[in-house]
Amino acid sequence: LERQNVHIDNSLDFCVLVRLFLSKCNALFVAHTLRCDKFTTHRMSKADLEEKAFLKIPEYMKEQNRPYSAVDVYTNLRQEFGKTLVLKVLEASVASGVLKEKLVVKQKIFYANQDNLGEYDEAAIAESDAKINELTEKLTGISAQYKELQNELRVLSGMQTTEQLQKLTSELKEKIGRMKTQLAKFEQSDNTAVAEDGKKAMELEANMSKLLVKRKRIATDMLNAISECSPLKKCELLDSIGVELEPGEWVRMDNEEEGGFKSVSSMTYRELTEEEKKKLQQQDVVNEFKQKKLEAEAQKNWDRFYNRNRDNFFKDRNWSGQDLQDLCRDMDLTVPLTFLEAGCGVGNMLFPMKSAFPNLRLQGFDFSPRAVQMCSERATELGVS
């Protein structure tokens, strides 16, 4: 109190200070006691842990009867004991003859001493092996059956349920009923406009059929002329050109096949060659960069194409006038009409149309400025406006 420069004026202050001093001393004593108990408990827990390790680790090694390193034992026991303690127990077990050790690539491997396991019954082992094989076969069969059931379940899960099919059937029946009612209404109708439209459609279909026959004859003559000077067989020539024929149509092959004919029906097929299969596998979609490049350079490429093929590629379609007359029988083509062609090129269709029908007013446009220029120059030469 003198060090603290505390002056006591009366007995009451002295009693208060004494009580404060005693309470502080009591707190220090309790803290010291707890600290000592903690150290004692820690030492007891370590001893118990070692005792438990010396019991559990050798028993685990004998039960597993497999070679393990100290790290494997530490991991397999879920790090219940420290690595140092595990190694200590294993080495002590080797010294006592419970375990054996072997050095494999600078690492100690511990395993149960087989001499301590005693005699074993070979008949019992053979019986166990037979039972294991039997259960393995049974498991294989059950696994295969399980896979089949899984596949069947997957297929059934993707199918519609009975309730859904019944609902769909009822909806389709209602739709069929409405369509039958509408059909009967149309059949009983006396609308002359509908009948007239039907008649015109039939006439147009007949005209188109005649035009198709005519064009087919022209194409056949062209193919025959080409095949005479081509080293390819006719079937190979058709495949290389990419000619599309009607399903079920037969083309004469100059006696190359049995009977002299070959079916090119879309219902038949042939095996692809290895080269064709490779080409199919190599087909890729044009990437975005190349698409933009083609669009940006399209005008330049077309201009270059027209410059290279000005005199040796373009031929007038002199049959265009007859085609238009066959298609538009109900139109009077002798009166002034405006004919607009999108993608007119150099006018291989415009000028034959003008020659066939002089009263036509021709208009055309094309993507290539060079084609439009060539078309204008040709119009000037022919005196066509």
Image (cartoon, rainbow, N blue to C red):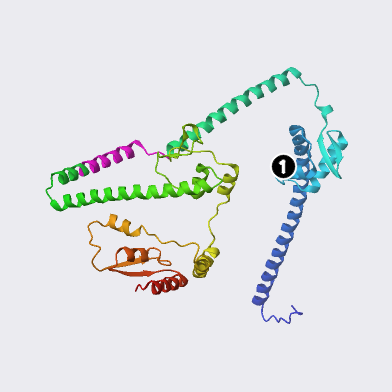
Q: Is residue 12 above or below residue 298?
A: below
Classify residue 145 as left or right of residue 201.
Answer: right
Between 290 and 369, the residue placed more toward the observer is 369
Classify residue 343 as left or right of residue 22.
Answer: left
> Which corner quadrant of the image does residue 265 belong to?
top left
Q: Is residue 240 above or below residue 312?
A: above
> Which corner quadrant of the image does residue 173 belong to?
top left
Outermost residue toward the left in this view: 190
Q: Is residue 5 magenta?
A: no
Q: Quadrant of the C terminus?
A: bottom left
- The residue tagged 1 is 76
Q: Residue at x 20, y 52 (%)?
A: 197
Q: Position of residue 229 (x, y in %)?
A: 53, 48
Numbered marks: total: 1
Query: Does dot 1 land on a helix, a strand or a loop?
Result: helix
Q: Is residue 170 magenta?
A: yes
Q: Position of residue 118 (x, y in %)?
A: 81, 24
Q: Residue at x 46, y 46 (%)?
A: 224
Q: Quadrant of the N terminus?
A: bottom right
Q: Position of residue 52 (x, y in %)?
A: 75, 41
Between 10 and 300, the residue placed more toward the observer is 300
Q: Residue at x 80, y 21 (%)?
A: 119
Q: Residues within 10 Å of mark 1 (few under 14, many from 20)?
A: few
Magenta part of the protein: which range? 158-178
Q: Residue at x 47, y 72 (%)?
A: 370
